[in-house]
Image: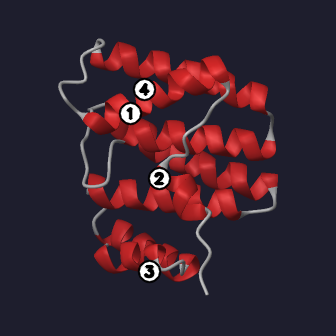
C-alpha cells in the first residue's frame, strides 16, 4: 500500500493503481487500503477526458467509500465521506455543471452535519470539509480538496 501511495504522489498513476489493486486483493478487509484505492480511482477519474471513464471510476470509488463511511472509519489520510464529497463535486464540476456540483455540496454538507450531529469533536479535517461544502453550496467559492489538488499536479 505504501509503495502505491508513493507512486501516486509522484504522479505514476497506472503503476500506483496496479500496486493498490494488488494490495486490495491481498488484504480485502483493510479500510486503509480500500480508502487509498478509492482515492486513486477518483484522482484518475479527474484526469480523464472521457466522462464515461470518469463516472465508471468514480462509481467504483463511491461504492467503496460509501461502504467504509457507514462505520465512520477513520483512516490515515482522511475520512471516506470527505474523499467522496470532494471527489464527487470535482467530477460534477468537470463533466456536468457548477449548478449540479453546488447541489452535491449542499447534499454532502447536510450528510456530514447529520452524521456528526453538528459535533465534529475537534476534528479539523471534517470541520474544514463541512465549511468548504457550505461555502461552495451557498456562494460558489470553492477550496479544492486533496484529490483535486493531487490530480492537478504537474510532473516533469
| Quadrant of the drawing holding the N terminus | bottom left
Marks 3 and 2: in contact by CB < 8 Å?
no
Residue at the disc numbered 2 = 146
Disc 1 to disc 4, C-alpha distance:
5 Å
Residue 34: quarter of image: bottom left
Residue 127: quarter of image: top left
Q: Quick one: label 4 or label 3, which is nearer the N terminus?
A: 3
Numbered label attached to residue 7: 3
Numbered label attached to residue 74: none
Disc 4 to disc 2, C-alpha distance:
14 Å
Q: Quick one: label 2 or label 1, which is nearer the N terminus?
A: 1
Residue at the disc numbered 1 = 128
105 sits to left or right of 120: right
Q: Secondary structure at mark 1?
A: helix
Question: Could you tell me which residue is drawn at 63 percent across and 55 percent down?
Answer: 57
Residue at the disc numbered 4 = 130
121 sits to left or right of 19: left
Marks 4 and 1: in contact by CB < 8 Å?
yes
Q: Quick one: label 1 or label 3, which is nearer the N terminus?
A: 3
Badge 1: residue crowd in 10 Å (few <14, some 14–19, many ≥20)? some
Of 77 and 124, the residue lying toward us: 124
Q: Secondary structure at mark 2?
A: helix
**Does residue 123 lie above or below 144 as drawn?**
above
> Number of callouts in the render?
4
Question: Could you tell me which residue is drawn at 69 percent across and 31 percent down?
Answer: 101
Task: Give the residue furthest to the left.
Answer: 121
Question: Could you tell me which residue is drawn at 52 percent across and 50 percent down?
Answer: 61
| Quadrant of the drawing holding the C terminus | bottom right
Query: Is label 1 or label 3 in front?
Result: 1
Amino acid at each position: 500500500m505504501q509503495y502505491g501511495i508513493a507512486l501516486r504522489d509522484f504522479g505514476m498513476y497506472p503503476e500506483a493503481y496496479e500496486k493498490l489493486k494488488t494490495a486490495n486483493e491481498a488484504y480485502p478487509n483493510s479500510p486503509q487500503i480500500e480508502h487509498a484505492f478509492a482515492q486513486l480511482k477518483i484522482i484518475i477519474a479527474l484526469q480523464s477526458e472521457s466522462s464515461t471513464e470518469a463516472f465508471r471510476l468514480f462509481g467504483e470509488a463511491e461504492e467503496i467509500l460509501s461502504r467504509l463511511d457507514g462505520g465512520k472509519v477513520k483512516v490515515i489520510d482522511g475520512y471516506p465521506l470527505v474523499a467522496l464529497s470532494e471527489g464527487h463535486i470535482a467530477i460534477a464540476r468537470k463533466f456536468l455543471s457548477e449548478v449540479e456540483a453546488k447541489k452535491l455540496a449542499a447534499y454532502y454538507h447536510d450528510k456530514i452535519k447529520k452524521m456528526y450531529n453538528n459535533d465534529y469533536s475537534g476534528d479539523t479535517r471534517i470541520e474544514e470539509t463541512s465549511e468548504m461544502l457550505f461555502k461552495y453550496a451557498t456562494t460558489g467559492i470553492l477550496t479544492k480538496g486533496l484529490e483535486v489538488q493531487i490530480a492537478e499536479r504537474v510532473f516533469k
